[in-house]
Amino acid sequence: MQTSLYQECSQGSANETYVLECISHGLQSGVNTFFLIFAGCLVFMMQAGFAMVCAGAVQTKNVRNAMLKNLLDAVGAALGFYCFGYAFAYGGSKYGGPTTFLGHTGFFLMDVENFYLAPDVNGFVYFFFQFAFAATSATIVAGTLAERCQMGAYMMYSFLLTGFIYPVIVHSVWSPNGFLSPTNVNKLFGSGAIDFSGCGVIHMTGGITGLIATKILGPRTGRFFDERGEPLKTPAVFEQHSIALQALGTFLLWFGWYGFNSGSALFITLPSRSDTAARAVVTTTLGAASGALSALFAHLIITERESGEGIYDITMAMNGALSGLVSITAGCTVIEPWAAIIAGAVGGLLYVAMSRMLIKWRMDDAVDAIPVHLPNGIWGLIVVGLLATPTYVMEVYGSPHAGWFYSWAQGSADGRLLAANLVEILFVTGWVTCTMYPFFFVLNYLGWFRSDPLEEIIGLDVSYHGAGAMRDSSKDDEYRKFLEAKSLKRQNSNSSSSRIGRRSSNQERDLESLDIMPVDRKSKQNIY
């Protein structure tokens, strides 16, 4: 039989003060729990946004594979974060405790409700909220490895990142016992690093991981090199599946970002916390808008100077908006709206510059996830160190150390917050590089990382899933040809060691007869 909140609170006590306090706490707990569940659902919806962006950016023959990898990010994050990640991130955390490198209790959510935010925040709902963040960090890499990564390697990566690599960074920055945390009793430089929603924790982690993986994995076949391995004068441009899906994904990500930033307030029943959440949605909106415009018009000016005719590229506008969102993530609650516009605008410019640099370096990122997340994750932390408002920093963190520009204007030149955030940048870079580079290197050495060349040619939808993304009779014929080609390759693998790694001329002619030899879009020549 259900009872009312008043009945629950009045049982066993006639003290009116106690009853009123009990009712007040019950209402606050319910509101805070619903707020965090709702915010977590918004963050989890970003998985659909990433999936749509990937599905729209890859070639049609790889859509199903891209969608499955995005789904596996959520699956891997749920299991990895449940088993180990949450414990490494927050296990044993408590206010006033000693500084630790990672958590050590709470594996498999044991004793989950006995944690440092209780009773203001429910332990189970906090796990859900943090799981959604972990999944977001993992799925950033999905687009960078699209169209050429083996399924098994991707599943291993997703579990490792969310189960160990990412939680160590979370503990260092967001746990009250982390050495970078602004809530640590022994704050770094007396300030601690302010990264409210995860510029470094999430976006730098995903961006650096993607950069390392892309470097080791190499570009898609025919993207930068011809059939002799010589660099192409102009990189090949592959036809993308759907710009409409990319636009839909961008709007879903923007929508989810409101939960991402405002939800990090964790509870809203206190006036200061509700003000924090309200300020976050405003700065989030302005950062995205300015990022989209700066990237769009920067690309317009560049193409006009290069070709004589400017191009209004929707892809630049969409990724510019995402870059602005990344740029505002760390400081969404501690900077003014006008500063959010500056942060987003610079973020859009950084995206355009980094995207062009990757092409110059012949690094293949199918969805431009690296230039969206990596430089703007770094920039977002620097923005906080420069433009964090003293009033907001005191309100949210109780710290007297604000942005360097504000301190400098007051004649103090207090750069402690900026220094702490720079240390976070160095820590995230070093930790992710030292752990993920050996991991991907070993996978690649064992031959478990990159898909087989024939699988890449025919498309990963056919290779791994038995059919193309758009099912029709022609796909059955393609699949038959692919199986025949695989059989030829197995026969060739039994030849002498001097011919290992090279196709015989007979096999090459057989592949040509199957009409699945890779062809460069510019030269129309076979790329083997």
Image (spheres, rainbow, N blue to C red):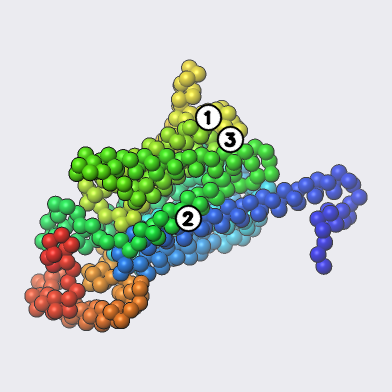
Q: Please tell me whether mark 3 or mark 2 is closer to you in this view.
A: 2
Q: Which residue is mark 2?
A: 252
Give the camera-side residue of 45 and 410: 45
Residue 34 in percent (x, y) is at 65, 54
Relative to 479, say whether 236 is above or below.
above
**Tag 2: amino acid:** Leu
Mark drawn on residue 89? none
Per the image, label 3 sits on a secondary structure element best described as helix
Q: Quadrant of the N terminus?
A: bottom right
Q: Amino acid at mark 3?
A: Tyr
Question: Residue lying farthest front?
Answer: 309
Residue 167 rendering spot, x and y as whole percentages:
48, 52
**Contact, mark 1 vs mark 3 (Cβ under 8 Å):** no
Name the secondary structure under disc 1: loop
Residue bearing the label numbered 1: 389
Q: Residue at x 20, y 79 (%)?
A: 485
For mark 3, what is the residue? 397
Going from N to C along the chain, the mark reached first, 3 or 2, is 2
Q: Earlier in the sequence, mark 1 or mark 3?
A: 1
Q: Amino acid at mark 1?
A: Thr
Question: Could you classify mark 3 by the number of other residues whose Cα lies within 10 Å: few (under 14), some (14-19), or many (20 or more)?
Answer: some
Between tags 2 and 1, which lies in front?
2
Q: Is residue 156 visible?
A: no
Residue shown at the point (39%, 49%) measured from the top left = 318
